[in-house]
Image: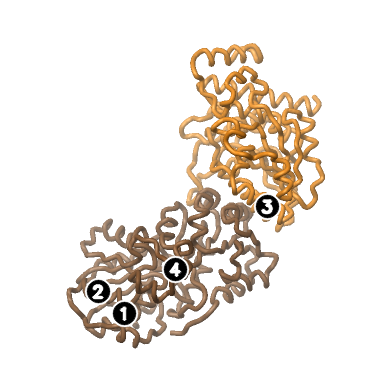
Amino acid sequence: MTLETQVHQKNLVKWAADKPEVVVFSADLTSSTEVRRFAETYPDRFYSFGMTEQNMMSAAGGMAREGFTPWVHTFAVFLYRRALDQVQMSVAYPNLRVRIVGFLPGITTPGGATHQAIEDVAIMRAVPNMTVLETGDAADVESVLDVAQGVDGPVYIRMLRGQIPRLFTTPMRLGRARRLRRGSDVTLFTAGITTEEAMRATQVLEQRGVSIEHLHVTTHKPFTDPAVLEAASRPKYGVITFENHTTVGGLGSEVAEVMAEHGVGKRLVRLGIPDTYAHGGSRPYLMRHYGLDALALVRAVEKLVGEDLNIGEDDLAAVRVEPVHGDFKAEAL
Amino acid sequence: MSWPQEAKRVADGIRRRVTAFTLKNGGGYLSQACSSAEILATLYTRVMNLGPSVAPPVPPPFGGVPGKNPDYTTGAGYNGPHEPERDRFFISPVHYALVLYATLVETGRMAEEGLEMFNQDGGTVEMIGAEHSPGHELMAGSLGQALSQVIGIALGRRRKGETGRNFAFMSDGEFMIGQTWEAMETLSFYKLDSVIAYVDANGQSADGRIDEVMGIEPLKERLEAFGAVAVEVDGHDVEALAAAAETPHEGRPLVVVARTNPYCGVEVLSERAPRFHYIRFAGPEEKEALERFYVRKWGGRE
């Protein structure tokens, strides 16, 4: 696994080169949302809206009506919290091709509760017409652009910035989870930054004899991938969801809805931020404090299988995460 | 007929039709017709360069919301086709819907039968207009969002090299809203002189007199401080309303603050002061008084 920096910054400029319909909106966080290079490369297609997120969102709807696809960039909290009415009435109701790019998902920022988007998936999933995507690595961050641009309606993207791992060698696909591991004891669904943590844990868990089916979810809505139901139906002990989001309304709820609607009688353990606001701090601290790291997952698996597997932090730290193919070549893993 | 005569005829027709509906329905947004009749009449008959309606004279039934829906229809076609050199019209306070529908009938853009569909279940001629309602193009019922949407449209049209102007019809109550001022600073920042807003400054909002609800004055000076060219006119003077659109405003948005009277032309309403937002008859006497007023002014009702 390699760590890469400013993936969106570099990729967006290349990607948008032959797409004159793509314009970028920014709300005074141009560098912080990695669109500075776009602004410098295509100044004519870059629109500064200052700190007017409500106004910016409605304007994005207006410009989409004229045939352009605004890519609206700012911190997620200022989009789905501050500008939710505008998201709904100026963009989602008219089903316009606006791409809402929200940064700082969950506890990926030390900025504290005002900056941490911990319930955005729950809220945006409830908005009619909205497609909801989440990125977990560099390949997701790059390929989410094509996926979003192919949707004839509004799209919300949980975006990553700064230093991010490259976990996958294939592009993300709409409505298709990436299968990272085949197994029969526990089925694990992860999304965003929890996937990398889970990849550490699952290697050690396999070594200790727990067979794990692992899917990385990039499409929260529509949540219709048949692989989800298939994977949730099979495990011996149960299903675990693991998300950088509160346990209300996000990935855990998505999987629960599918399981309940199909009468899947398996236990479901939802790991995530436990229905609380977080606070400011370093990412390792926050991941430990709110139970979002590999060790938290290991403990949940132990509880589910009813066995102490004697796994410690040292075991997890020693794990080397290698990039994997997406679900196309799942069988080869 | 000269254009001012025609504008006055349309304004009178707007008041007559909305008064009739208020009597028929036992209530309605009548005061808004009183205050804005000349503004809408002047915009439609004199100021805006709109093509003829491209929508069916009798509005279609509700075909569902936008999305994966082939039956969806927009109400924009009543304002003519979208063409590069044509103006566009956007209504922001969509509880004025009936006033706009009456305007469309008076200007030959919608059939009278369409007005009969007002507020009927399953129709598009709704009480609070949505983008499928005749003459509407945007979702504006959550007040304060339309002007920002017009910014996006105006920027998009500029990108395409279109020369048509973009008219927003607003109410003064919307100047209580933060987003309106965000929009105003953005219009100035982008030098969007293709945007012209006409404000029905009737001094009224839902709770009553605006100056007892929230402070928005001096509106003209505030607008100027935000970088707009603002002119104040008598909102019942069709010639002044038309002349206001010619105010030089290169590189800046133009806002016409039309000072209006919430019972102009239906003076019997003045007894309701200061509550005009939605006319709901307090008792049979009030309705009878309006009925008598109607007969005296316009003759018998159908």
- Contact flag, marks 1 and 2 (Cβ < 8 Å): yes
Give the residue furthest to the left: A306
Of labels 1 and 2, earlier in sequence is 1
Residue A309 place in picture, x, y as percent: 21, 81
Residue B136 place in picture, x, y as percent: 60, 40
Residue placed under numbered mark 3 in the picture:
B185
How packed mark 4 is, by other alpha carbons closer than 10 Å (few <14, some 14-19, many 20 or more), is some
Label 3 is found on which chain of the structure? Answer: B
Query: In this rendering, do the residues under marks 1 and 4 share a single chain?
Result: yes
Q: Colour of chain A?
A: brown
Query: In this rendering, do the residues under marks 2 and 3 share a single chain?
Result: no
Residue A58, above or below B206: below
What amino acid type should be assigned to the residue bearing mark 4?
Gly
Residue A5 place in picture, x, y as percent: 53, 79
Label 2 is found on which chain of the structure? Answer: A
Residue placed under numbered mark 2 in the picture:
A301
Residue placed under numbered mark 1 in the picture:
A201
Task: Give the SS element for disc 1.
Answer: helix
What amino acid type should be assigned to the residue bearing mark 3?
Glu
Q: CA distance from mark 1 to mark 2?
A: 10 Å
Label 1 is found on which chain of the structure? Answer: A
Say whether residue A27 is left or right of residue B68: right
The N terminus of chain A appears in which quarter of the rendering?
bottom left
Residue B131 place in picture, x, y as percent: 56, 42
Say whether residue A159 is left or right of residue B181: left
Of labels 1 and 4, earlier in sequence is 1
What amino acid type should be assigned to the residue bearing mark 2?
Val
What amino acid type should be assigned to the residue bearing mark 1?
Ala
Residue A305, above or below B169: below
